[in-house]
Image (spheres, grey):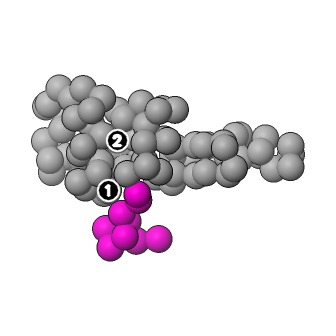
Amino acid sequence: MDLVQRPPAPAELRRFSQRFGSLGLLDPASRAYSAAGLAYMRLDEEGAFERVLADPRLLRLPLVRWGTRLSVGVDEDAWRTWLAEG
């Protein structure tokens, strides 16, 4: 899915934010993060959430939801566990 053309719904992002924290959704290795100067800013959880809502390019991808289970970034161990549990 192209997140710039169709950004994630705020409620969906809130699920991930509640589980991992809004700061955990940010990708500090992304160009968008560098371009926004976020490495030099102090963001609180709500500020980080507003940033990812405004610019989905800041997200650490992939965001994976399988039922009630969530993961942020590449987490192959979690995915294997989910598949094994069915």
The answer to whether residue 23 is above or below residue 13 is above
The residue tagged 2 is: 26
Residue depicted at 69% across the width and 50% down the height: 67
The residue tagged 1 is: 56
The answer to whether residue 2 is above or below residue 14 is below
| Residue 25 in the image, given as x and y percentages of width and height | 40, 40
Question: Looking at the picture, which amino acid does disc 2 mark?
Answer: Leu
The answer to whether residue 57 is above or below residue 6 is above
The main secondary structure of the magenta stretch is: loop
| Residue 49 in the image, given as x and y percentages of width and height | 30, 40
* Magenta segment boundaries in residue numbering: 1-9
Residues packed near mark 1 inside 10 Å, few (<14), some (14 to 19) or many (20 plus): many
Q: Is residue 46 left or right of residue 77?
A: left
How many marks are shown on the rendered structure? 2
| Residue 82 in the image, given as x and y percentages of width and height | 77, 45
Circle nearer the N terminus (1, 2): 2
Res 74 seen here: yes
Q: Nearer the viewer, residue 1 or 53?
A: 53
Residue depicted at 81% across the width and 50% down the height: 83
Residue depicted at 36% across the width and 35% down the height: 22
Q: Is residue 74 magenta?
A: no
Q: Quadrant of residue 37?
A: top left
Identify the element where label 2 is drawn.
Answer: loop
Q: Which dot marks residue 21?
A: none
Residues packed near mark 2 inside 10 Å, few (<14), some (14 to 19) or many (20 plus): many
